Image: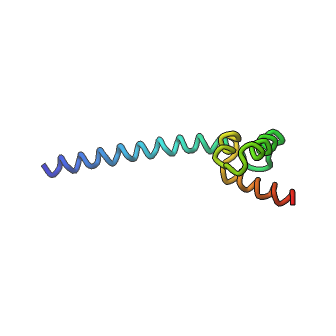
Amino acid sequence: MWKASLVASVDITSKSFEQGKNFKKQKSKIKKRRIRGRWTAKEHEIFVDGIRKYGNNWKILEENIPTRTGIQIRSHAQKFFSRIK
């Protein structure tokens, strides 16, 4: 009886490990589509149009610029606004 409960807990642990492994694979696929470095002219154009339409609603801007993360967009906005002033 003791061995059966031990085996059951091992099975649960291995399932959660496999799920975590799949999550890491999905997360790495998402990271691959993000770009580092300079913004392209098209990305910047989409950014400026998004700022005009949605203001500082970063979630919507992130959906409209799929190649950049929310952090990258906010950083770009900070630099953009400091250059305007």
Relative depth, front residue between 24 and 73: 73
Residue drawn 87% across the image and 60% down it: 85
Please state the total of marks drawn on the protein image: 0
Q: Residue at x 67, y 49 (%)?
A: 57
Tell me the colour scheme of the image.
rainbow
Q: At which x and y percent is residue 36? A: 73, 49
Q: Is residue 80 above or below residue 40?
A: below
Left or right of residue 50, residue 59 in this image: left
Image coordinates for residue 44, horizontal then vertical, percent: 80, 44
What residue sits 81% from the left and 54% below the top? Answer: 80
Residue 83 at x, y = what percent? 86, 58
User: Residue placed at 80% from the left, 49% from the top?
Assistant: 38
Q: Which residue lies furthest to the left in this view?
A: 1
The answer to whether 79 appears left or right of 22 in the picture is right
Residue 41 picture location, percent across and down: 84, 41
Q: Of 56 and 29, which appears nearest the observer? A: 56
